[in-house]
Amino acid sequence: MRGRLALGLVVALAACKPPPTDETLARTAPEAEKSFASTPVPSPETDGAIWAPSERVEQRIVYGIPGEPALIALACDESDGTLSVTRFSPADEEAQAMLALVGNGHVGRLPVDQAEADGRRVWKGTHDPASEEWEPLAGPRRLIATLPGAGTVEINPSPLPMELIERCRSQTR
């Protein structure tokens, strides 16, 4: 008896709700606000590019083709003993990414954020100079620096990056 009563109750409740219709299939979720990254830039040409001491900032070196704008900069901040890397390529507002350094038997991944430099948005990250993520810059072979949307920069070997990193490391000890 109880089973029949329960079954009857279920049938009665089901009868209160109309069956689904094709109209419910036509409903869509509200459209989300569209947000797109800027168009990626091609990898820059680096034939003849070199590391050189910055003419404007002490404890900073820049990488690029002589006479043209720099592609990358490394700088040691003596006040807090940090090392920063700047990739001079357009960055979207509030963007974040990972700069990959690959070469000389090492892979380094450095978080970078959009930052202001000379009135434009570029990529910049500040890190501990003791981090092993800088190791691709040590060694006698070429390496690459890759950033999503900013292409790949082929970096010719030079002792300058590791000399700057070692000076920065010695200031934090």
Image: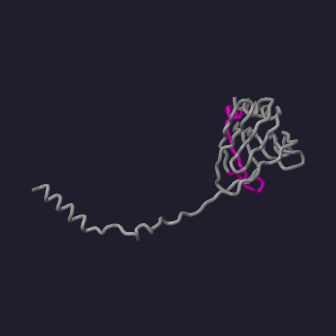
Classify 18 as above or below 169.
Answer: below
| Residue positioned 83% across, 34% down in the render | 158
Residue 135 left/right relative to 26 = right
Compare residues 83 and 24 and report the one nearer the observer.
24
Q: Seen from this angle, which residue lies furthest left?
A: 1
In percent of width and height, residue 119 lies at 76, 57
Which residue sits at x=80%, y=46%?
71
Q: Front-most of 70 and 43?
A: 43
| Count of marks placed on residues | 0
- Quarter holding the C terminus is top right
Q: Residue visible at 82% across and 34% down?
A: 157
User: Foreground: 66 or 44?
Assistant: 44
- Outermost residue to the right: 67
Q: Tell me residue 103's x, y (percent).
A: 74, 34
Residue 35's spot in the image, x, y percent? 61, 60
Magenta segment range?
Answer: 114-134
Q: Residue at x 18, y 59 (%)?
A: 7
Residue 115 colored in magenta in the image: yes
Q: How is the image coloured?
A: one colour
Residue 126 lies, with reference to residue 165, above or below; the image says: below
Compared to 2, does 13 lie above or below? below
Give the side of residue 4 with respect to residue 42, left or right. Answer: left
Magenta residue check for 65: no
Q: Residue furthest front?
A: 22
User: In the rendered image, which quarter is residue 27 located in?
Assistant: bottom left
Q: Nearer the viewer, residue 39 or 17?
A: 17
In which quadrant is the N terminus drawn?
A: bottom left
Going by the image, does 62 lie left or right of 123? right
Task: Identify whether 130 is placed above or below 151.
Answer: above
